[in-house]
Amino acid sequence: MGKIRNFLIAGAALALVIAAFIGLAAPVPAQDYPTRPIRVLIAFPPGGPTDFVGRLLADKMSILLGQRVYIENKPGANGTVGADNIAKSDPDGYSLFLTTAGAVTISPHVMANIPYDSLRDFAPIAEVVTNTTVLVVSPKMAIKIAKELVTLAKQKPGAITFGSTGIGSTTHLAQVLLADAAGVRFLHVPYRGAAPMLTDLLGGQVQVVAADLTVLMAQIEAGTVVPIGAAADQRNQTIPEVPTLAEQGYPNTDASNWYALLAPAKTPPTLIKKLNDAANSALADPDVRGKIVKSGAVPVGGTPDSLGVFMRAEYDKWGRVVREHGIKETP
C-alpha cells in the first residue's frame, strides 16, 4: 500500500507541475497582444474607396497598437472570397476583415452556396463608416431631382435605363426600393464595377446610375454628373443640398453602404475589446476623420454589440427585399 500511495502522490505532483507549466505557457491575450503584425483583408482591388478607408484605419491602428497593421487585397465574387478567407482563419486577432455591406448582409441571399454564415462565422469589432448611395444623371438629362426622374419613368414604363455596380449590390437595391416606393419600372443595367458604369453614363449609353458618394465625389465636384437624390435616411453633409429620396416623397429607400471591421468567430473578447478601442480611437483622430469626411463617407465607430445588432437588422432587411423581388446572381 505504501508503494501505491507514494506512486499516487508522485503522479499528482507531476500533474500539478504540468498544469502549472501549461498555465504559464498559455497566452495572456489582453496583456501580450499584439506581438506580431495584424492582417486586415479587403475584398476589393487597391485604390478603391474601401481600400482608401482601410489604409487610413490601418496606419492609425498601427501606432495605437504598437504593431504593424497592414492591408491585404483579395478581390473576388463580390467580396465573398475574402469573407470566406477570414471566416476560416485562426481566431487569434491577427486576421481581420474590413467588409462592405454586400459580402455579409446581401450576397448570402443573392448567391448560391455561400461557404460561410455571416451571423455565425464572424465576431463584430466596430462599424467604420457609412457610405451614402447617391443617384446621379448626366447633365444632358436636364433632371435636377428624383421626382423628375419618376415622372419620366411613368411616361416610359421600363424604358429608363438605370445602371448599378452589379446584381444584388446596394446600388441595384437602391433602384429596386425607389421603383417600389414610386410605383415605376426601370430597365436595370448591371455593370462589373463603377468605372465602366460611369463611362457609359457620360457616354449616354445609360440614363441614371446609383453609386457610393465616395465613388462619385470627383464627378459631382466637376459637374460631369448631377446628383438627384440620396438613398439614405439622412442627407450627407458633404453634399447637404442633395435631398434624400424619402424627403422627395419616397419612403423606405435607405440603401446606404457601410464598412465594418470583423474578426473570425471565437476570437477572444479581450482581443475584440482591444481592437475596438483602437478602431474607435483611430476614427476619432481629427486627421483620419477629416480625410474620411472629405471623401464623402461618414465615420461611425461604436461597440461590437451595436455592430452585431446592426448587421442582424441589415441581414434581415436585405433578405426580405431579395426574396420579394426574386433577385438572384446570374451564372
Image (spheres, rainbow, N blue to C red):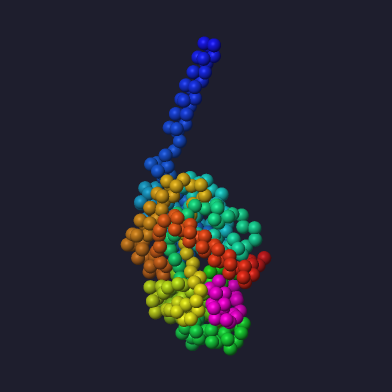
Q: In this view, does 315 lie above or below 67?
A: below
Q: Which residue is drawn at 54% across and 81% down?
A: 182
Name the residue at the left extreme. 286
In this picture, residue 156 sits left or right of residue 255: right
Instruction: Indicate the quadrant containing the C terminus: top left, top right, bottom left or bottom right.
Output: bottom right
Q: Residue at x 35, y 65 (%)?
A: 290
Given residues 79 and 116, the one toward you in this image is 116
Percent coordinates x, y for residue 190 in the rendering = 59, 72
Q: Is residue 42 above or below residue 148?
A: above
- Start-end of magenta stretch: 173-190
Instruction: Indicate the quadrant containing the N terminus: top left, top right, bottom left or bottom right.
Output: top right
In this picture, residue 295 sits left or right of residue 157: left
Q: Which residue is drawn at 44% across and 58% down?
A: 306
In this picture, residue 310 sits left or right of residue 286: right
Residue 188 falls inside the magenta stretch:
yes
Name the residue at the right extreme. 331
Percent coordinates x, y for residue 258 in the rendering = 47, 64
Q: In this view, does 23 lie above or below 243?
A: above
Percent coordinates x, y for residue 117 in the rendering = 58, 55
Q: Is residue 279 above or below residue 180?
A: above
Residue 255 falls inside the magenta stretch:
no
